[in-house]
Structures are given as C-alpha cells and as structure tokens.
Amino acid sequence: MNDKYSSANREQYGQRLAAQLCDQHFGAAPAAALDGPAVLRFTPIRQVNLFVVQQLLAQWTGEMARLRSPYFDFEAPDVRQALTQFMNVLSRRIKLSRAAFEPLLARAISDTLAVATDPQLTFEQKLLGSQPTTTAEQLRDALRYLDLDKVLFQGFIDTLTPGAPLERDFVLNRFRLYQEANYKNHTPLEKVVAEFAALLPLSVADLREAAPAPKVEAAAVAPAPPISKPVEAAAPIPASAPEKAPAAEKPEPTPPTFVAPPAAPAPTPAPAQEAEAPRRPLAETVAAAGVPLYEKLKAEQPTSAPLSETLRGERPSATLAEKSAPKVESLREAISINQRFSFINELFNGENMEYHTAIQHLDTLPSADVAKRYVTEDLAQKYGWVRKDEHINKLLKLLDRKFA
C-alpha cells in the first residue's frame, strides 16, 4: 500500500485546497484571525480540524520547553503552577492569521489523506511519535485527535497491557499484524476522497505514484548498435573514407533528442488542476445552510478555553494547579479546549451540540449535589458510560470548583 500512493501528491493537494479554503474565509476580511472554536469548525471534515489543533498543541509544547533555563528551578511547585496558569490564560487568546493558519491547514489535509492511504504511517507519526518506548495510556491519550479510523486504532490499543512500558519496534510490528488481520475496520479510501472531492476535485488516481515508463524507451534504443557493424564492412572504399569522417560528426545533432524530454514536463498536470479548482467551490457543501463558510464561521459564538489543559511534560503541575484552582463561575469558561475534545469524544459520542446542551444545563443547576447526580445518573445512563471514570472524574472536579 505504501508503494502505490505518493506523499508529494498528497502535499500538493493539501496546499491547493488550503489556499482555496482560506480564500473563502479570509477573502472578505484579509486581516481577520481565527480563534479556537473557529478552527474546530473551519472545514466540514472533522479530522482535518483535529489535526490542525494537534499541530497547535505540538508547537505549544515546544515553545514552553524553550522557556526552561539552567539558571532557574523550573521544578519548584510554585513555578510549575505559575507556568500552568500562564499557559491557560494565554491559550484563551488564540489568534491565527491566514499566514500562520494556511500551512497548518495544508499539513492537516495531507495527514488526513495519509490516514486513509497508510494507517501504519499514521500510527507511527500521530500516536507513537518519536519516543523509544510508550504505554497503552499514552497511545490512548493521543487517540483523541483521531476521528478517521478511530475504531481500528482503539481496537489495537485495547490489546496492549495497561501500564507496561513497550518498546517502539515491538509496538510497530504488533500494529502491522493487527492491521492486516482487521483491515475491514479501515475506512475505504474512496469514501475519504469523495469528501475532499466535494471541496476540490480529487480522485484515487490523483494520489497514486506515477509509473516510471521512460526507462522502456531507453532499452528499446539499445539494439541500434548492431546496425553499425554492416556499415563498417562497407566502409573500406578508399575515396569515401575521408568523407565518412565528417559524416561521423553529423550524428552530433542527436542532442536535440535529449532536449525534447525536458520539454515534456512543460504541460504539468498541477496547473491544470489549479485552473479547474475554482469550478467547484466550497459553497457546494455549505449550500444546505444557505450561507457562505466565512459568514457561518463569523456567526459562531467564540468560546474562551485553553488549548492545552495537560501537556505531557507538565502533568504534575496540572494536578497541582487543579488543587489550588480558583472558583469558576461558568463550566463553559473553565473547560479547556483539550478537555472539551476529551469530553465530546469520550462522553458524548463525538456530538458537539449534545455536549454544549449538557454543559449549559449543568451551569444552571443550584448545587454541587444536584449537578453531580445529573452527571452520574442521568448523563451516565443516557450515553452508557462504561470505563469512562477518568473523564467523569475530571468533569466532577470542575463541578467542585464551580460550587466551591
């Protein structure tokens, strides 16, 4: 499967589609900026939006790591707590201009197509990362940014022993075997391509590697030398011998045949597709709503929430911050973007509106006891929460802060 599809083709398509979508959104207001909620709804393909947020989180982690210095104690409890609070405050001020957002979007589109063409690569890059060892818990934590083929990846993680450190090569080999045995859980590439084609024309053939046919012509020219031998047999004519020498120089015009191949790349297919791109605008997918994408996103209610509640390297500080976290007036304001993803995916079956309805209702309840009963009885029964203790406890802790 890896040999059939071209990463260069995926990246080229991602750049073209990202440019078209950004034209749709930023065209009427070039100086506009996107906040967190707008990023989550920017495209109708949820996996693309999630990959954009995952890239933001990775950038965020790298920038926070660069704050460390050998001259200060960054492990001191008050320093760790202050850093966590700083990150939460700053992440409520997400502001992405087109110049910053478009490369992230192009990469997210390419990575989404990679999920459909190469699950093994997606597992290695998006879940396993670069660490030499991992655990089932770490893989499950990264899984929240995957919407496409989530059943396939979740099924594999469930086969791993909880809490046990696992070698990178062992996990990769084991996933390869699991994927081969459970390939029926893989989303068909045709289905993913159809979703993208509704935004910008794309076919499965566009993603395949080009066949290296020119080598066949070079082999066909090889039999030509035997023809020269009979010509040499007829050459011993004394008078024509001097004339054959200049005739031998005439084959020098053959270089024009080498100049011809460079002319072939001139009609590159990419510009042709770019010329056709505007014929199928994004409005096809937004037509049902009756409004363009820009107006739809502009009408969204921005929700202030931190991008990262728990960075992997800062987990202890997050716990300390929770213990001394101040009282909050609204759950909607207190829930970070990272927590929001977890709650929507793990507790509300990926339904964004049902999550908002539940949180809005919790904000209206009069006491912690009533709110907790609503969570542990009503919501738990409605959504069939099984093995969701970790996420339920996080929601209950937020309720403690609200009613403190």
Image (cartoon, grey):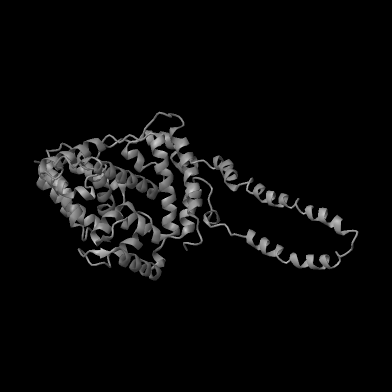
- Residue in front for this viewpoint, 356 or 1: 1
Left or right: 10, with 276 as reference point: left
- Residue 392 placed where, x, y %? 18, 53
Left or right: 147, with 223 as reference point: left
Left or right: 94, with 401 as reference point: right
Q: Residue at x 18, y 43 (%)?
A: 362
- Residue 198 placed where, x, y %? 50, 47
Q: Residue at x 82, y 55 (%)?
A: 245
- Residue in front for this viewpoint, 341 or 261: 261
Q: How many marks?
A: 0
Q: Is 260 rendered above or below residue 96?
A: below
Question: In this rendering, does residue 18 appear at all?
Answer: yes
Question: In this rendering, does residue 366 appear at all?
Answer: no
- Residue 114 placed where, x, y %? 43, 55
Indicate the quadrant where residue 279 lies: top right
Q: Quadrant of the C terminus?
A: top left
- Residue in front for this viewpoint, 63 or 9: 63
